[in-house]
Amino acid sequence: MLVETGTLDLDRFAKIRRLHDSTTNAGEKAAAATRMKVIAETAGMTVEQVASKLDAAAPKPVHDAFVGSSFAKAWADLMNTPEQRAFEEKRAAEREKQRQEALREHGTQEALFDENPWERRLRESCQPLLGRHAVHGYTTLDGWDGVGSRIPAKVRIAVSSAYRLPRTVTEAWDETQFWEQLLDHRCAFERDYEPWHWIRARIQVVEELCDTLPSRGIEDLQRRVEWMRHVNNLGWSRDVHEDNALIDRLAADVASMAGVVTALAGMVERVSRQEMTSAAVQSGHEDHASQHPAADVRSGRPYRTNADKRRDVLALLGQGLTDREIARRAGVSPTTVGSIRNAQNGR
């Protein structure tokens, strides 16, 4: 790695120049040229001066020109295969699509790269932790270089308190998607774009919440499944402890949902038993009333047989009334109406 000289970031300039020299896309080339100019002007230099400094710092080739030319030819041959050309065309089309999406959302490339409110709060919260690597001189946060999942405690506190942490799996998934889309859009214009350490730290904290927050309902459980699908498609393996935490949380979610389903099943069973008991009691009264056919003691109405009630219900079924209204008019239960309706429909 080239050491940063003063305010001149040679590493970043070199990456952007490689993109500028290698791409055939006019949009990418113009964007790279603009960013090289910004880096040079920040250091009080021209692009040509920085390029000259970069070339002077480049290591000298060890092998002779024949080796270099042979490698270049082999590389050119590899990049010129039909498969590679098709791959590059597909990748260029995807980047162009993302660039257009980014411009529709942000308006301009400059607005896309502008610091948003979340980024500003993260930077301000982490400002006291900023440092420099003792050897290479790059930026660190409390000694953390932005690589690896072991975030220092002070950094974790800083990014967690910069603004409210997600409280549900759905909120955590939404924030994860926000950062992924933003970084994808920026990388569409600058392939070597790298987010600041405080953004990396915040993303890691939110991803941990996707792993470990309990699901509060079906929506959260669905978002967790989407998160698991996202993890599966990353293209690399995570730390086994992260995967174990996710599996344990999913198992707890399933157990919780099973408890809810069991409780609902018990409620349905109790209601069913109550209806059966009510029907039995009603039947008992009707048997009792059959000994006194003159009247229904409870309602004062003339006694009606089950056949009478069925006839009354059938007469009301075709009038577009609800089961409850039919039950009220016919003097029967809604359950009885439903049973007669189902019998008529052949269910």
Image (cartoon, rainbow, N blue to C red):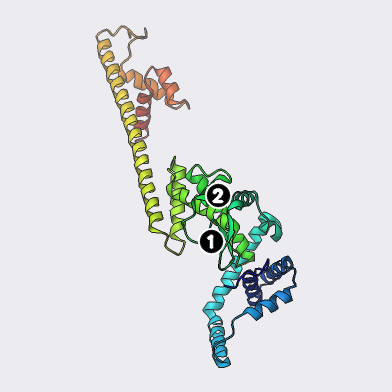
Q: Which amino acid does label 2 sit on?
A: Val
Residue beneath the point at 43% across and 47% down = 212
Give the number of the disc on residue 94: none
Q: Which of 158 and 329 is in front in this view?
A: 158
Residue that extends furthest to the front in the rendered view of this protein: 134
Q: Which of marks 2 and 1 is in front?
A: 1
Q: Counting other residues with Cα less than 10 Å from the Cα at mark 1, is it few (<14), some (14-19), or many (20 or more)?
A: some
Cα–Cα gap, marks 2 and 1 = 15 Å
Residue 187 as seen in the image, left or right of residue 325: right
Q: Which residue is labeled 1 in the image?
A: 145
Q: Which residue is labeled 2 in the image?
A: 159
Secondary structure beneath dot 1 equals loop
Is 201 situated above or below 258? below
Mark found first going from the N terminus, 2 or 1: 1
Is 20 situated above or below 309? below
Q: In which quarter of the image is the C terminus?
A: top left
Instruction: Check whether the beta carbons of the residues at disc 2 and disc 1 lie within 8 A of each other.
Output: no
Please provide percent x and percent y for residue 315: 41, 23
Q: Nearer the viewer, residue 194 or 328?
A: 194
Please provide percent x and percent y for residue 270: 31, 27
Residue 108 placement: quadrant: bottom right
Q: Does the rendering let one see residue 180?
A: no
Q: What residue type is labelled 1?
A: Asp
Please provide percent x and percent y for residue 243: 39, 55
